[in-house]
Amino acid sequence: MDDGAGTPGPTSIAVFLDEQAEPLSTYRPPATFQLDTTKLEDGDHVLRVRATDAMGNVGQRRIPFTVSNGPGITVTGIRAGSSVHGILDINLNAFSGEEPFDPERAESHAPIPVWTWVMCAMVAAWALWYGLEFFQTPAEFANTPTYAANPALAAAAEPASGSVALHGPTFSGKGAVAGFDYEASGTSAYAANCMSCHGAGGAGVAGTFPALVGDPVVTDSNPRQQIITLLKGLQGKAIAGKSFAAAMPSFSELSDQDIAAIVDHERTSWGNHAPIITPGDVKRVR
């Protein structure tokens, strides 16, 4: 090319679409070019730009792009590259941006992936655990065994083994000690807090609530573990090689006098013979 003054002419630019041999148009740079994608089929296309300078040197650039003017299409029941057999139920749907929203059409008919169900189950399990672990007991039920403080949380606050010890010749074995008479309230305190599970005769319920009759903790000469069990609750521990479904709630809301009365009642009833305690022993363990 020559501009008539003996010097090379300017560069020219030709614009091609896909693999068409003829250009859409040719320009002298710089130029502005408009591409009307509404006249193209939806799908993948390539814009090719070829520039030729006055010396005949050619530069090319390919720009892939995707046209998506038509309605969106969803296909469920078959996936690209999948191996299939038999009869397939394939669901088809299409939406245009100009259409009003239709909830029934928008609802997907695809099965929910297994990982989604697993994730939902994990979240539900966590929410259930969190609610049980940290639920604040209503004030009107706070002093009942069923809604007592969570045993797991109470156990976390239990002093290290051996950090609390009973001191002195506390246990007389005579039904009363140091001015404390467990018989005055032991029967009623046991009936109000323990009898519904362990029974009036301390026999418990097989597989659910352990018997107190002859229980090694109840009959132990050292009552510390029995006091801890009443204060902190107990769950999941095998007793005499047997497991029990129900959890022992915490009775930490009871006074030292009531805890001592229950302990002494259990240690001296139904044929049990073990040293009794005083409220001071409960206070030291608490």
Image (cartoon, helix red, strand yellow):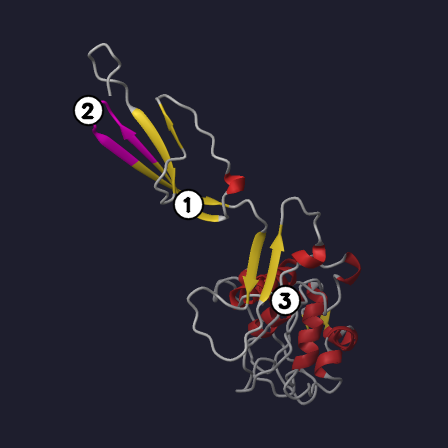
- Residue placed farthest to the front in the image? 4
Q: Residues within 10 Å of mark 2 (few under 14, many from 20)?
A: few
* Image: magenta residue range: 49-60
- Residue placed farthest to the top in the image? 5
Q: Residue at x 31, y 36 (%)?
A: 61
CA gap, disc 3 and disc 2: 98 Å
Task: Give the residue number, with chain letter if any, for mark 1.
Answer: 45
Q: Residues within 10 Å of mark 3 (few under 14, many from 20)?
A: many
Contact check, label 3 and label 1, Cβ < 8 Å = no
Please provide percent x and percent y for residue 70: 57, 48
Q: Is residue 11 magenta?
A: no
Looking at the image, is mark 3 or mark 2 earlier in the sequence?
A: 2
CA gap, disc 3 and disc 1: 76 Å
Number of the front mark, 3 or 1 = 1
Residue 175 in view of the camera: no
Task: Give the residue number, with chain letter if any, for mark 3.
Answer: 231
Residue 167 versus residue 131: which sits nearer the camera?
131
Name the quadrant of the N terminus.
top left
Contact check, label 3 and label 2, Cβ < 8 Å = no
Name the quadrant of the C terminus.
bottom right
Q: What number is the disc on residue 55?
A: 2
